[in-house]
């Protein structure tokens, strides 16, 4: 691909700057996007090779944290803020609204459970624990409307702020995308690395500091395993850490996700799949070499963050992630665009003394696909009286205390409406299931039980309804 001449940068970016200003984007966001755009024009790929991303062998472990940290965490709770990344629409599941408004258990959405977790902590501890949501332009209004059901959540801080957005870039001309049929598709999220910019441009960071908050716990709203843990908080506070990343052991199911590594200078480094050179993919996916992945549960010392930002004119030098995608995600044949993003976890390299902590897998229960949601619907997970998510006690006897592996045919179960139609009576019992693989167009009756490794196959062209009350194991063909 022939790159535009570097001398054309200023004139080309002027189109982007005008577009961002017309949309009300802050000047800081425009300035950072310009830096990333210039990197793109210069041929930057965002790749990080294995020489710069060395394996991490040993880390502090959650199970080794003493009770002294628990006491320290309880003391620090009064100065702590819980922040949930709530910008996701669940477009890969065919959604157009906030993913956090999906039902998880009967009568409870992700947002319901998060709010009730916070209210429980407030009642039990007597602290003012605030809940903050970083919404996107697409999720803000619907989320605020849903929160109207919780007047008792009232707090001294605004409950939400809105992250930015960036223009998409035509991959062939490097010019701003123009898509008159659906102008919203001309824009893309800047990745959750935008949290640092948004905290500054909305004034939220200064507000938190002015009101005496020191510790920020950040996680995704679709990860109900990420409860505020006072033992981890105590470790973070007592060790006077500037930045802490929760990581978990990689399994074969995590081989395509990002991993924790170490730079030659000894600092920790987060490397995402899109930052891996294609010729190094096998090495990247070696879970024995790269043992830990980022759960995206992060702890940030707010005064240190403010200091680092001030030293760098409010710009954190986060590694560029260049994603090439179709302009219309629902149409893979549509023209190609670049989306320039950053990851919030990559800031771990920018804080001297930053650490990672190995945590139990239950602190990472994200929902990225309909198969993940089916697991949450099932009896494998339960919501405790304090609104934490845990594996059912009946599941604790299974190897490594893990949920079953779920594989659903994307053709028939890829969208949330597909899942709701085919499991209209809820998920089957999966307590005794180690793996469930569904191929073909099957509808599930009520009160079903899956046992062991289960493979259900519809060989025919027509949909098949599996009767109520079936107990299934092994490979079963339907037609």
Image (tube, helix red, strand yellow):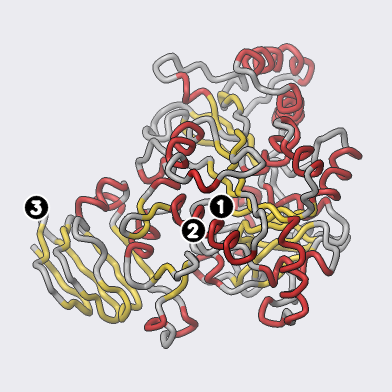
Circle number at residue 366: 2
Q: Quadrant of residue 41?
A: top right
| Labelled pair 1, 2 in contact (Cβ < 8 Å) | yes
Neighbours of disc 2 within 10 Å: few (<14), some (14-19), many (20+):
some
Nearer the viewer's eye, disc 3 or disc 2?
Answer: 2
Task: Measure the alpha-carbon separation of dots 3 and 1.
Answer: 39 Å
Q: Is residue 205 above or below residue 17?
A: below
Circle number at residue 144: none
Neighbours of disc 1 within 10 Å: few (<14), some (14-19), many (20+):
many
Rendering coords of residue 72 (x, y %): 77, 71
Q: Quadrant of residue 42?
A: top right
Q: Earlier in the sequence, mark 1 or mark 2?
A: 1
Q: Is residue 167 above or below residue 100?
A: above
Q: Earlier in the sequence, mark 3 or mark 2?
A: 2
Q: Residue at x 72, y 68 (%)?
A: 74
Q: Which residue is mark 1?
A: 220
Rendering coords of residue 290 (x, y %): 66, 68
Q: Secondary structure at mark 3?
A: loop
Nearer the viewer's eye, disc 3 or disc 1?
Answer: 1
| Labelled pair 3, 1 in contact (Cβ < 8 Å) | no
Q: Secondary structure at mark 1?
A: strand
Q: Which residue is mark 3?
A: 462
Q: Secondary structure at mark 2?
A: loop
């Amino acid at each position: 691909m022939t790159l535009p001449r570097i001398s054309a940068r200023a004139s080309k970016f002027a189109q982007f700057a005008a577009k961002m200003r017309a949309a009300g984007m802050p000047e800081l966001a425009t300035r950072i996007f310009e830096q990333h755009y210039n990197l793109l024009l210069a041929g930057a790929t965002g790749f990080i090779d294995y020489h710069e991303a060395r394996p991490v062998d040993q880390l502090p472990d959650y199970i080794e944290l003493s009770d002294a940290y628990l006491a320290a965490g309880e003391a620090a709770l009064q100065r702590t803020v819980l922040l949930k990344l709530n910008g996701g629409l669940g477009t890969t599941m065919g959604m157009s609204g906030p993913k956090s408004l999906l039902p998880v258990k009967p009568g409870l959405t992700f947002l319901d459970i998060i709010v009730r977790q916070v209210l429980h902590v407030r009642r039990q501890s007597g602290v003012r624990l605030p809940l903050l949501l970083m919404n996107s332009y697409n999720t803000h209004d619907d989320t605020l409307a849903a929160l109207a059901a919780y007047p008792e959540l009232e707090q001294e801080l605004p409950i939400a702020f809105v992250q930015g957005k960036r223009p998409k870039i035509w991959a062939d001309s490097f010019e701003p995308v123009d898509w008159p049929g659906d102008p919203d598709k001309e824009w893309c999220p800047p990745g959750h690395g935008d949290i640092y910019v948004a905290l500054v441009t909305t004034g939220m960071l200064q507000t938190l500091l002015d009101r005496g908050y020191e510790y920020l716990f950040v996680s995704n709203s679709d990860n109900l395993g990420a409860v505020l843990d006072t033992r981890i908080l105590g470790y973070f506070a007592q060790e006077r850490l500037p930045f802490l990343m929760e990581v978990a052991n990689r399994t074969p199911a995590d081989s395509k996700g990002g991993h924790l590594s170490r730079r030659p200078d000894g600092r920790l480094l987060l490397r995402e799949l899109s930052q891996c050179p294609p010729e190094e993919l096998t090495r990247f996916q070696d879970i024995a070499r790269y043992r830990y992945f980022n759960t995206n549960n992060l702890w940030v010392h707010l005064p240190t963050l403010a200091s680092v930002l001030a030293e760098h004119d409010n710009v954190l030098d986060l590694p560029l992630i260049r994603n090439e995608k179709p302009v219309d995600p629902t149409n893979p044949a549509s023209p190609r665009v670049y989306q320039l993003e950053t990851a919030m976890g990559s800031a771990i390299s920018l804080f001297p003394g930053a650490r990672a902590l190995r945590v139990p897998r239950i602190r990472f229960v994200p929902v990225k696909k309909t198969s993940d949601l089916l697991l949450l619907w099932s009896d494998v997970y339960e919501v405790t009286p304090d609104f934490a998510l845990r594996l059912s006690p009946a599941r604790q006897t299974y190897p490594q205390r893990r949920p079953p592996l779920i594989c659903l045919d994307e053709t028939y179960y890829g969208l949330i409406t597909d899942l709701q139609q085919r499991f209209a009576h809820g998920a089957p019992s999966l307590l005794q299931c180690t793996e469930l693989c569904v191929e073909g167009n099957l509808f599930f009756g009520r009160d079903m039980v899956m046992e062991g490794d289960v493979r259900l196959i519809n060989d025919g062209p027509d949909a098949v309804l599996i009767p109520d009350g079936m107990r299934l194991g092994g490979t079963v063909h339907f037609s």
